[in-house]
Image (cartoon, coloured by chain):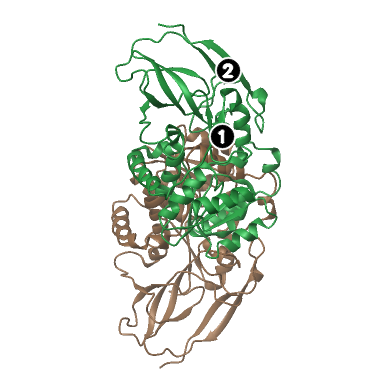
Chain colours: A green, B brown
Amino acid sequence: MATQPVTTRIVLASRPTGKPVAANFRLEQETVRDIGEGEVLLQILYLSLDPYMRGRMDDAKSYAKSVEIDGVMEGGTVARVVGSRNAAFKPGDIVLSHSGWQSYAISDGSALRKLDPDAAPITTALGILGMTGFTAYAGLRNIGKPKAGETLVVAAASGAVGSAVGQIARIFGARVVGIAGGAEKCDYASREFGFDAVIDHRSSDFASRLEAACPNGIDVYFENVGGHVWNAVFPLLNDFARVPVCGLIAHYNEEPSISEGHNQLPTVMRGILRRSLTIRGFIQREFVDQRPDFYREAAQWIAEGRLKYREDIVDGLENAPEAFMGLLEGKNFGKLIVRIAQ
Amino acid sequence: MATQPVTTRIVLASRPTGKPVAANFRLEQETVRDIGEGEVLLQILYLSLDPYMRGRMDDAKSYAKSVEIDGVMEGGTVARVVGSRNAAFKPGDIVLSHSGWQSYAISDGSALRKLDPDAAPITTALGILGMTGFTAYAGLRNIGKPKAGETLVVAAASGAVGSAVGQIARIFGARVVGIAGGAEKCDYASREFGFDAVIDHRSSDFASRLEAACPNGIDVYFENVGGHVWNAVFPLLNDFARVPVCGLIAHYNEEPSISEGHNQLPTVMRGILRRSLTIRGFIQREFVDQRPDFYREAAQWIAEGRLKYREDIVDGLENAPEAFMGLLEGKNFGKLIVRIAQ
């Protein structure tokens, strides 16, 4: 075998308090060991950066284990097989893996899915045709259940999950009101994704503009933000409204101020009772049986031009921490992906 | 026709701030008018008093209209037909009606359900075989969905809804931990309803005792209380736990203190997300199609001695306000019913 490659990896150096900072990450290098029988050596081409990773940096009870201190940061990846002692894979194969923030990884093959580069750009396996798109689909199909003519509101409407939620909800027949931060993202979401209205949550009259955009109230609120967006949405939820809770990006970098002041819980619980609301947290993994339906339907919608997506590609693994910190502040524009190798 | 009877009724004199007081109610008397074609004259025998009535005294957005100022207080009743110009009813018939806090009422017959006094005590139509029992059944069947071996927690476990919830959950195969206020109610719930454990929420170490009683966490929490019981339950909810929200009696008489201090909402929303929790408000009316199933199953369970109930009967309509104020403080012991006439 040729000289073993050196892997570059980014590990969790320390747990953040509030917003992550550069010192929470550390870049390391190590020569990759020889692969054993049944194993494959992967060269990582693309790494997906997603808000959920902020939760993995905490040491809290969650649906998934925390990243250990000094452990490689977790993440979905697209990789090329560059060495194989596993009959199912040969060098040159492109696979979806969950190899984390590093440039090479060894796998026993069990969690790999082969991708067909001719069927779709391989980065889409990290976004619209991957976890991102399926999160939108699963949350709508199983919890949000928008009906024709109902009003659905989704925040981060120009983002990876939000733009898929809004477009799929429109395909299901709902009227879609998006929320985004800043005029550029609002204009883009309105023009590119065809939402019925898009409201800027940074505008001073955000709550009243949202109310005006939802004259019949809100039947589904796809929650991926929390914070002041929730506060504006909550009074507008109709009887029997459904709230799939997919993310709370405004809370991930929680600063003390978010838990100060008035205790909102009694008001929210009374609203849940009086308006027969459903609030339901979920992760896409729970609905794994529906993935084949999703791949089939989403590919069709993309082919028809009804489901569009935007990617925001950053070059170089060493830039992943900064890109991730920017993601948590809404600085990306589209599905954030790091290109590690060509 | 004989001399027209005089009806006594209790109206909403003013809206309460926090706990209702005697001055929020006013007793009035009026001679009943003649009934018209198609109408029936009802003499009210029993009035059900329920926590939801506190919500009707407020002028807030809810699933049901508020009682108007000077309007008769709302409530479910069992009545005897004493005059009829409606072919479907004859004097002497016993009916379930929603006539409110008064001694006589006129109905067009459309919302009446005839009761068979030989099949079950007629008061059960206001409790275990009425809205109370069906609320427990509908919340469990549609939202709580306890599976065999799961742990269900219910508060007000000696009360009308709570005792039915716990017993039906046991019939469904769940392990049931009840919560009640004071040693007498705890002993009773344990002895009479056969719950696996009953914890006194007034004990100083309530939260740690609840945790000890739920070594495998909580899979279903039937919420009818809120406040400090919720605070003890929330950390124990397992991944995919379900919380049917049926009532919030601790909040109905909300005092300013309940919304003071730490804002709990961000913590609760994060818990919903991280543990894929379902929080779902409901009223039994939504599941009206399941009532025939319920009547059949509940009658069977009662006959088999697997579903027991306790009634707390107060004499005299004039005592309804005091009994209702006591209900909101947990002073009743069993389904609270006012006997208005024999």
At label 2, the amino acid type is Asp
| Quarter occupied by the N terminus of chain A | top left
Could you tell me residue B323's position as x and y percent?
A: 56, 64
Residue found 41% across the figure and 36% down from its top:
A285
State left or right for residue A117 relative to residue B50.
Answer: left
The foreground one among A74 and A60 is A74
**Disc 2: which chain?**
A
Residue ID for mark 1 = B208
Can residue B222 be seen? Answer: no
Q: Work out whether A98 lies above or below B26.
A: above
Could you classify mark 2 by the number of other residues whose Cα lies within 10 Å: few (under 14), some (14-19), or many (20 or more)? Answer: some
The foreground one among B241 and A46 is A46
Q: Work out whether B199 lies above or below B289.
A: above
State left or right for residue B54 relative to residue B115.
Answer: right
Q: CA distance from mark 2 to mark 1?
A: 35 Å
Could you tell me residue A332's position as x and y percent?
A: 59, 38
Residue found 37% across the figure and 63% down from its top:
B288
**Disc 1: which chain?**
B
Could you tell me residue A104's position as x and y percent?
A: 48, 17
Disc sitting over residue B269 in the figure: none
Which quadrant of the structure image shows residue B54? bottom right
Could you classify mark 1 by the number of other residues whose Cα lies within 10 Å: few (under 14), some (14-19), or many (20 or more)? Answer: few
Which quadrant of the structure image shows residue A250? top right
Could you tell me residue B331's position as x and y percent?
A: 56, 56
Q: Are marks 2 and 1 in contact (CB under 8 Å)?
A: no
Q: Work out whether A337 lies above or below A161.
A: above
User: In this rendering, which labeled residue sits more in front, label 2 or label 1?
Assistant: 2
Q: Are marks 2 and 1 on the same chain?
A: no
Disc sitting over residue A70 in the figure: 2
Helix, strand or loop at disc 2? loop
